[in-house]
Amino acid sequence: MPPDIAPARGLTAGERLAFEEDGFFFLPRAFGPADAARMQDEWWAELAERWGIVRADLRTWRQPLGDPKRPKQAPSELCFRTPEIKRALDGVLGEGQWDWPRDWGRACLTMPSGHRLETWDIPTRIWHSDGRTDWETGSPLNAFVFSFVAEAKPGGGGTLVLAGSPRLVRQEHAKLTREQRRHGGTWERNRLSRLGPWLSGLTGAVPGPEDRIAAFMREGGEAEGVALRVVELTGQPGDTYIADPLLVHNIAHNCRETPRMMRIGMVRSHAARAIIKKETEWAQRQREARS
């Protein structure tokens, strides 16, 4: 059962600054390592039954076709409802302005690729964000939650994020004309990927530097006056990142010897759910009018 939820203390100054500047912040041990170990057991049980991937038999390891499904219905979903995660979500979305989600999003599994660790590199495709720019013009209406079920070391398949990108996405969306906004999210994403030489090199729009890790992770760069840097999300079981829904991110190869097990979900505010309800009702009326 989840622990008693303590009153929210709000974000620390460091968390607030990281969220505003980079678009995400780190919560070490946001839920219990013992609970994470229990989740790992659940994942491995499904992998064995559904795909024949046996934890103790490396010969059976391969990337399954699809995500594990059972975690979303498992009793361990309640283990994410901790005081630390509540404090963080209250600080981003507002205390009393959101409800615990039914589940914690995708169960993202990345099995070892078989490539040597020294071959790990930053991909060019597909950098994207999952939030909607027409919603997130001010304070976030939703929060992205990345939670580690198993340890993820550097080069081990952890999600890559573009620190600073939510500020850039909002800034550039605000510049668009009404006609440009009608082009939709894919058009906006493609436009963003070509904003200046640094972003163009990162996304493959133009040839990039030979040492991508140095250029994009260690040195960083900028686009339209916004400082940017690629960060690899790594952590121990129970560690969590809270992120802006407009954070640009990407998948990465797992060049380690253990699977990357991470939950990635979106927690919606009451305001966001009200928008979804209105849009759903409008779409229903349109279907009825055409029938």
Image (cartoon, grey):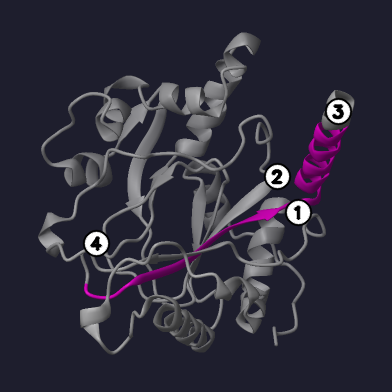
Mark nearer the N terminus (4 vs 3): 4
Secondary structure beneath label 3? loop
Measure how far apart labels 2 and 4 are at the Cα level. Answer: 32 Å
Crowd class of label 3 (few under 14; some 14 to 19; many from 20; radius 10 Å): few
The residue tagged 2 is 141
Q: Residue at x 69, y 83 (%)?
A: 2
Nearest the eye: 49 or 160: 49
Specify the amino acid type for callout 3. Answer: Ser
Secondary structure beneath label 2? loop
Label ID, residue 179: none
Nearest the eye: 3 or 113: 113
Up/down of 119 relative to 69, above or below: above
Specify the amino acid type for callout 2. Answer: Leu
Front disc: 4 or 3: 3
Mark nearer the N terminus (2 vs 1): 1
Q: Residue at x 12, y 64 (%)?
A: 116
Measure how far apart labels 4 and 1 are at the Cα level. Answer: 35 Å
Mark nearer the N terminus (2 vs 4): 2
Residue bounds of the magenta highlight: 257-285
The residue tagged 1 is 94
Q: Do the numbered discs 4 and 1 sit on residues whose CB atoms are within 8 Å? A: no
Label ID, residue 155: 4
Q: Do the numbered discs 2 and 1 sit on residues whose CB atoms are within 8 Å? A: no
Specify the amino acid type for callout 4. Answer: Gly
Magenta-drawn stretch contains 170: no
Name which quarter of the figure residue 171 lies in: top right
Residue at far front of view: 291
Specify the amino acid type for callout 1. Answer: Gly
The percent coordinates of residue 41 (x first, y second) are 46, 87
Crowd class of label 1 (few under 14; some 14 to 19; many from 20; radius 10 Å): some
Say whether residue 207 is left or right of residue 7: left
